[in-house]
Amino acid sequence: MTPVPAMGADPNAGVTGAPPLDGSSTATPGMPAVDPAARQRLQDAQAVVAAKPGDYDTLVHLGNAAYDAREYAQAADAYERALKLHPDDVNVMTDLGTAYRNLGDFDRALELFRKARAVDPKHWQSLYNEVIVLAMDKHDHPGADAALARLKAEHPGLPALQGLEEQLGAAHAKE
């Protein structure tokens, strides 16, 4: 069974080739090493940000490129800088939360997912990620079940629900 990855604001982000639930990076058994193209995109994004250090879009692009290259600390820094310019961007908050999750800061990740939902209560990606962190990282199964129930009620046709439910069931069975 494949682990359920954290999901960024882009509903397709973090699915194929995403980091595993344990937050490990680059060379993970059963997972390919970072694509050299991702490393090149990161270098390109760094060059653009060097030329336009206060530009919101380039900071978000740098965060995304760093995340794809599994450079989570650099991604978090870029997303933090972008949020200083646009503090209510729920997509960037969610992406920052997934970066913090991959850095092992689960409480900060939850804080960001919940803040995103406070700004936009319909932002399903932040709730999806809250379920993952609660269940897989914090082992708070009652909290994860409650968050999953909200996700199912608010977004019943979400394609990722079935796989998420299967993973949560497997996690419950192991404990």
Image (cartoon, rainbow, N blue to C red):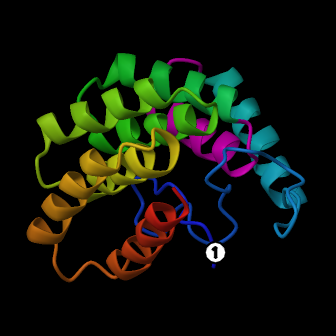
Asked if residue 73 can be seen in this view, the reply is: yes
Please tell me which residue is depicted at 24% across the width and 35% down the height of the picture: 114
List x then y, in percent, for residue 173. Answer: 48, 67
List x then y, in percent, for residue 59. Answer: 54, 31
Dominant secondary structure of the magenta stretch?
helix
Name the residue beneath numbered marker 1: 2
Q: Which residues are magenta?
A: 53-71
Q: Is residue 5 left or right of residue 41?
A: left
List x then y, in percent, for residue 53. Answer: 59, 19
Who is closer to the viewer here, 121 or 69?
121
Please tell me which residue is depicted at 68% across the width and 27% down the height of the picture: 74
46 over 52 or under it: above or below? below
List x then y, in percent, for residue 65. Answer: 67, 46
Element class at badge 1: loop
151 over 94 or under it: above or below? below
Who is closer to the viewer here, 70 or 51?
70
